[in-house]
Amino acid sequence: MPAPRPPQTARPPARAGARLALAIALSAGAAFAQEIVPPEPIVRSPAHTPADVRLERPVEVVLTVTVSEEGKVTDVEVAASGGHAIDAAAIDAARAWEFRPATRGGKPVRSRIRLSFPFAPTAPKPEAGPPEAGHPEAPHVEPTTPGGGEGREAAGERAAETVTIYGRPEAPSRGAGDHEIVPGELRQVPRRDAAELLRLAPGVFLTNEGGAGHPYQVFLRGFDAREGQDIEFSVDGVPINEVGNVHGNGLADTHFLLPELVESLRVIEGPFAPQQGNFAVAGSARYALGLARRGYIASATAGSFNTKRGLLLWGPEGTNDHTFAGAEAFKSDGFGQNRNSERASAIGSYEGRLGPSGTFRLLGTSYATHYSQAGLLRLDDERAGRKGFYDTYDFQQGGDSSRHSVALSADGRAGRTSFAQNAFVTLRDYRLRTNFTGFLLDVQRDDQAEHPQRGDLLDQRSSIVTLGGRGHARSHWQLLGHRQELELGYFARFDKVESEQRRNRFDTTTPYDTDLRLDSALANLGLYADASVRPLPFVTLRGGVRHDLYHYRVTNLCAVQTQPSLSSVEPDTECYALDRNGYRSPDQTASTAAGIFQPRATLLVGPFDGFLLSVSHGLGSRSLDPQYVGQGYDTPFARVRATEGGVLFNRSGGSLDLSARSVFFQTRVDRDLFFNQTEGRNTLAGGTTRTGWAGNARATGRFFDVAANLTLVRATFDDTKLVIPYAPDLVARLDAVVFDDLPWALAGARPRGSAALGFSYVGRRPLPYDERSQVFAVVDGSINASWKLLQLGLICTNLLDRRYRLAEFNYASDFRSQPFPTLTPARHFNAGEPRAFYATLTLHLEPAPPSP
């Protein structure tokens, strides 16, 4: 659900509709005391009168500047002109300023302030002493505390305007497990794509045994969410989980996102907000897109394994962060056999005014990829030297994927009520070829011609059309001397899905059998009410109820696959039209529908000297995979019950911003899903419980930004109490960046340098048959230098060149690498990437100064 936005403030006529300014006072209802701290200048640059300009009288140029979360000046507008040449001198000076960024609730946020540059009259030529031309004047600065009091300036005092804070207003907090992540300087930690930003949230671990274009396997709070079945993903309100994808119900592919365009990421761990819908089992992840810098950005990356990436970004002058365009092209040979990949992605967004108090936004994305995958190797083959660590068995493994979407959103305000509406259309095509077991599952059936084992290469395909929308209205009023709020909203989605799974002959794409062929129409309608009640200054109760209706119509196009003994159908005929009672249609339809009420609540107490206590409880749901739907199926969803309690700490002072939290949690699922190598996807299992603790902290100072998190969890089956395989019980992550101006000047400008480090540690994951995986520990690093419009970066992944197994499994297979194979379960693994180096060159082309 997109966060509500307040009305825009007035702008100069030439810039009408250019920016959405959010007044500081609108953050007043947040659960945590959302103290607003204006930006503070730390590097000032004086403005000089150009040598060829003579001023007969004093001139003052007033600029409206945007200060980013990193403290950089990203946009400059002339509010009061002194003439083209004088304006240009003031703009050049303003762009050299650096700030300690504004903060809201201790978190850096983007802000807009005014700078006033006075220029003294040019002195006459001289008998009377040196000229004053070019004399630098310190500009006035106009940041203030909320409410519009007086603010102190660089040269004296004057009445000043209220600082405005840009971006989406913070959504009401849902407790210690609700993480609003602004990457800031931590963007410089090596990350291959937007999915890896999830590692800034505690407990997240990512793997990808499917290849560079395959969606990530995500682990969170003891859940093996596979490609998204247990995490609700959305991008600016548009859901990206795929209902009915044959590779996994809920699959979420984030590869179409450009990490440079991710403005923020909100991760709610657990189903505690009524806005959370289908697949919010372990939690939800909401990406918000934006581009702070105006002008053109061109970037090129090259490095190990013949990897190449080109990136173009554009933020049109005079527009806000939500108007941008970006395009990416990527190609790599990969780090071993059958790991080559190629992709292209484009994203465009435009935001404008809608009436006196509203905005609208149009967002379009387009993405396509082709990739090969190495799949899994048996550990005994690698240790015996029959296969190399980075080799493959089947060179036909790989995939193709495309995604195209358009979304239109609008928001506004009428009195005390804010409202928002979003509509979206997504076209998706997905194909994957993967071989987990080799030559094991092609058993000889009576209705088949005699044949040898032909191989177990699974060929999966899904074609999906998604239509939907979501909207809400949120009102507030004063009661008991405090702000109270109520939000009513809805979510509606319809998916038309064609999916099939076939089996191909080994090392070919020739199909010989059909496992599954479905034509599905799937609908989800969710209605919710969300209230925020504050009976006392230090007590806030948030929550409400959500009702989801899941509706299914599933047509099995190959419903009869076993030849009836009384028929005379030729062997190897698929989708028979006969059964024991004679002729029948080869297809069969099942339909069902059911709803579930899901109450959710969070109690927040505080803050007390920076500390806030929270307790949350919620009921969630996950829709059923269409292949399991039967006529009149009573409950085509899984129930999720989650509880957590924790404490948050925020403190901002001087040059240090510090935040930390600790939370204990428990989540129960009545019907879970687990990976089945013979099916090549997740299949139904019984109930499960996860109990654990998570903690994280982030410290930001003038020259550093450090974030760390740790999660401990025990995940068990409810009936046997045995541990759940594959999900890690210990996940730790560290991201750290140091940055500052270098101590020398080059052509009149001081370069800025930084060094970044990322460290991931995952304990021994449980595997089937009471075994444990290898420890996962990887270090990545980068160094960057920027000077004027240029930026140069050097990235090293797997800095210590550790040979590690990214994913491990235990099951039986036969890849004919041994003369006498057995059905004894064996260890299988997917290799992690060896040490790699990449160099990046980025050019920033700023927009031309505005005309007076």
Image (cartoon, rainbow, N blue to C red):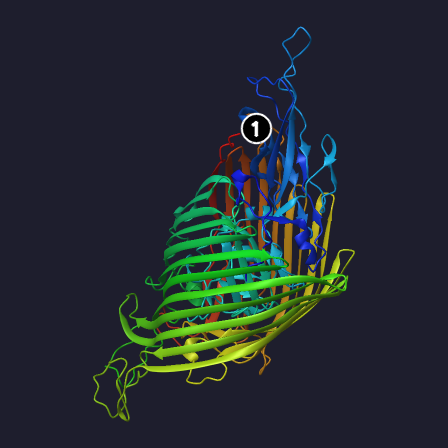
Report helix, strand or loop for mark 1: helix
Percent across and percent down for residue 81 are 58, 29
Residue 245 visible in the picture:
no
Is residue 199 or residue 86 the one in the foreground?
86
Mark 1 neighbour class, 10 Å CA radius: few under 14, some 14 to 19, many 20 or more: many
* Location of the N terminus (image quadrant): bottom right
Mark 1 highlights which residue?
87
Q: In the figure, 315 relative to 345: above or below?
A: above
Point out the residue furthest to the top here.
127
Q: Is residue 307 visible?
A: yes
Image-quadrant location for residue 824: bottom left
The location of residue 44, given as percent across then percent down, is 66, 32
Residue 665, how many percent across, how many down?
65, 70
Residue 135 image position (x, y, % from top left) = 65, 20
Q: Is residue 405 left or right of residue 321?
A: left
> Which is nearer the eye, 374 or 667?
667
Count of all numbered marks drawn on residues in the image = 1
Q: Amino acid at mark 1?
A: Asp
Q: Is residue 256 left or right of residue 196?
A: left
Please, is residue 253 above or below residue 315 in the view? below
Q: Is residue 158 above or below residue 125?
A: below
Closer to us: 605 or 574: 605
Is 145 placed left or right of 170 in the picture?
A: right
Pick the residue in front: 665 or 395: 665
